[in-house]
Image (cartoon, helix red, strand yellow):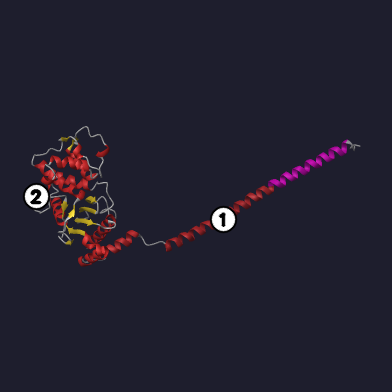
Amino acid sequence: MKKKYDKKTYFTRRILVAAAMVVTIAAIIILSLNLDIFAKDNKDEALELNSETLEAKNSKDKEDSPPNDSKEKNSALDKKMSKEELEQNIKNYMGKDINNLGLIYYDLTTGEKVTFNENKKFLAASTVKVQMNVIAYDWVDKGKLNLEEKLSYSKNDYEDGTGILQDEDKSKPFKIQDLLDYSIIYSDNIATNMIIRRLGGSKNLRTMVNSKFKINMDTSGNYITPKGEFTILKYLYENSNNENYAHLIDIMKNTIFHDRMDKYISQEITAHKTGDYDEYVNDVGIVFTEKPYILVAYTYNLQDGYEDIARLSQMVYEYHLSK
């Protein structure tokens, strides 16, 4: 049986229920506000602690961090090294492979020279492209060649290996200036073969090089001695008032190859030409520090000729700056 309430009792109960709900809601609101304040206080405290922790960590990191590389390097460069010490360092680095290295370092300001096997014959590989450019520019000066002249490609000019012309359309002729630049920047073999053909062939080129630089290079193949290459680079530097030679030096600074002479030194100051063929790995050039120098490096049958030349170049560079 359903229980009955009078009107007074009914309304009293309704008021009490409503009051209870108001009290409950108020309690919830107050609790929520307190929780927010507590959370904010905790967050502020956490941030403060985190800031202190980070500050402490940064302080420790500064204490544990290695010394500044550039300062350490500058300090190392401040230490004077004798020519004899440089020579011994190179011998120590090369070890039993010293006879497979042909190297010349030459200070263009003082004339100081360090050499290893300078008269030993090496395969020139693509370093021949420097002397080819020099002879081509000589022809320009003599009126025998025009840099705007265009050469047509012949199938006999094709050669695999380095370069960009292998995959390009060769149906149209190329300007001689472009071919000369390609031979240095990209070490382009096809461009080189086209220029050499225009100069009368490989043997004629070698004969002209011997005559111009008063060297006795073997004309039976693409051979060179470190001393012969040094003579060519020294001539190029000393005659850089010639605008075409100056252009060649600039182009040598913009080669795409940076795995040897300028791997550990500035690329912007290194005018060089790489070359490798089978066991021969080479790099030759002029390094334009405040007082420029020539570095010639020819190698044969080394385990990693690329890295060896890079390390030797770094060694010579640091010695040169320390003087």
Q: Residue at x 49, y 58 (%)?
A: 54
* Residue 47 on image: x %, y %: 54, 54
* Label 2: which secondary element: helix
* Label 1: which secondary element: helix
Frontmost of labels 1 and 2 is 2
Residue most extreme to the top? 172
Pointer 2: what residue?
Answer: 212
> Relative to the observer, which residue lies in front, 273 or 18?
273
| Amino acid found under the numbered disc labelled 1 | Ala
* Residue 296 on image: x %, y %: 20, 56
Give the quarter of the figure containing the C terminus: bottom left
Compared with 199, 275 (above or below) is below
| Amino acid found under the numbered disc labelled 2 | Lys
> Relative to the observer, which residue lies in front, 99 or 315?
99
Residue most extreme to the right? 1
User: Badge 1: how crowded within 10 Å, few (<14), some, or many (20+)?
Assistant: few
* Residue 58 on image: x %, y %: 46, 59
User: Badge 2: how crowded within 10 Å, few (<14), some, or many (20+)?
Assistant: few
Q: Which residue is drawn at 25% across and 59% down?
A: 312
In reply to whether residue 11 is colored magenta, the answer given is yes
Q: Residue 259 carries which label?
A: none
Q: What stretch is highlighted in magenta?
A: 7-29
